[in-house]
């Protein structure tokens, strides 16, 4: 357990309040100050805001988390929030912030966003799939195939099914070729 510093806790709370103040003209300057603090408490407070469901606040909290040196926990939480079914129709802004993080080990998450995201989220995820260098393994392929099967059994109703199906099959085919020897 990390000991709490009451003075720092008050500073963090004050900065967080200013970051989330809807009347603040430049809220991100308070996010920058939180990022400079960079402590476990600051990260924890921003992650809590990210999880709370207000997309504007989540966006600001993610911007601040992306400025911190230790970003992994922020990325994991961001992906959890993006994947929540309740956020599906309005998480494009959060997906746009993925570029602020190292996605090299997040292929399956990005593939899921591509398959199940709204138009904006899906388009942004496709860009990451096309241009990010991912750490891949046969296990990654198996996980991606599992999500693809779920996609086939639960097709989107927005008319994107055929295009996504074709693209996803091409991606999975390329991965199978990559691991042909290991998969047998």
Image (cartoon, rainbow, N blue to C red):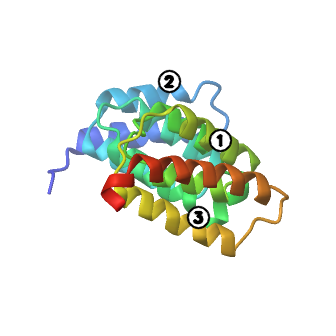
Tell me the residue that label 2 is attached to: 29
Disc 1 or disc 3, which is closer to the eye? 3
Quadrant of res 92: top right
Rendered residue at 35%/57% (across/down):
138
Residue furthest out toward the bottom? 153
- Quadrant holding the N terminus: bottom left
**Disc number placed over residue 148 in the picture, else none:** 3
**Crowd around label 2: few <14 · some 14–19 · many ≥20 (10 Å):** some
98 sits left or right of 121 in the view: left
Disc 2/disc 1 C-alpha distance (Å) = 19 Å
On the image, the x and y values in percent for residue 173 come to 54, 52
- CB atoms of marks 2 and 1 within 8 Å: no
Residue drawn at x 39%, y 53% is 180
First-in-chain label (1 vs 3): 1
Other residues around mark 1 within 10 Å, as few (<14) / some (14–19) / many (≥20):
some
State the residue position of label 1: 93
Q: Give the distance between the C-alpha atoms of the residues marked 2 and 3, in whole angstroms.
A: 41 Å
């Amino acid at each position: 357990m990390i000991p709490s510093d009451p003075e720092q806790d008050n500073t963090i709370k004050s900065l967080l309040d200013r970051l989330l103040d809807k009347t603040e003209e430049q809220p991100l300057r308070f996010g920058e100050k939180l990022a400079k603090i960079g402590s476990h408490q600051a990260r924890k407070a921003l992650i809590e805001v990210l999880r709370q469901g207000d997309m504007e606040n989540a966006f600001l909290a993610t911007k601040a988390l992306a400025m911190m040196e230790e970003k992994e926990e922020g990325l994991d939480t961001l992906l959890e929030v993006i994947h929540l079914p309740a956020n599906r129709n309005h998480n494009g802004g959060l997906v746009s912030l993925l570029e602020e993080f190292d996605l090299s080990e997040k292929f399956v998450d990005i593939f899921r966003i591509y398959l199940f995201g709204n138009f904006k989220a899906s388009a942004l995820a496709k860009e990451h799939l096309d241009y990010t260098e991912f750490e891949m393994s046969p296990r990654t392929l198996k996980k991606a195939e599992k999500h693809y099967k779920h996609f086939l059994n639960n097709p989107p109703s927005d008319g994107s099914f055929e295009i996504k199906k074709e693209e996803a099959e091409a991606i999975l085919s390329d991965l199978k070729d990559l691991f042909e020897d290991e998969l047998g």
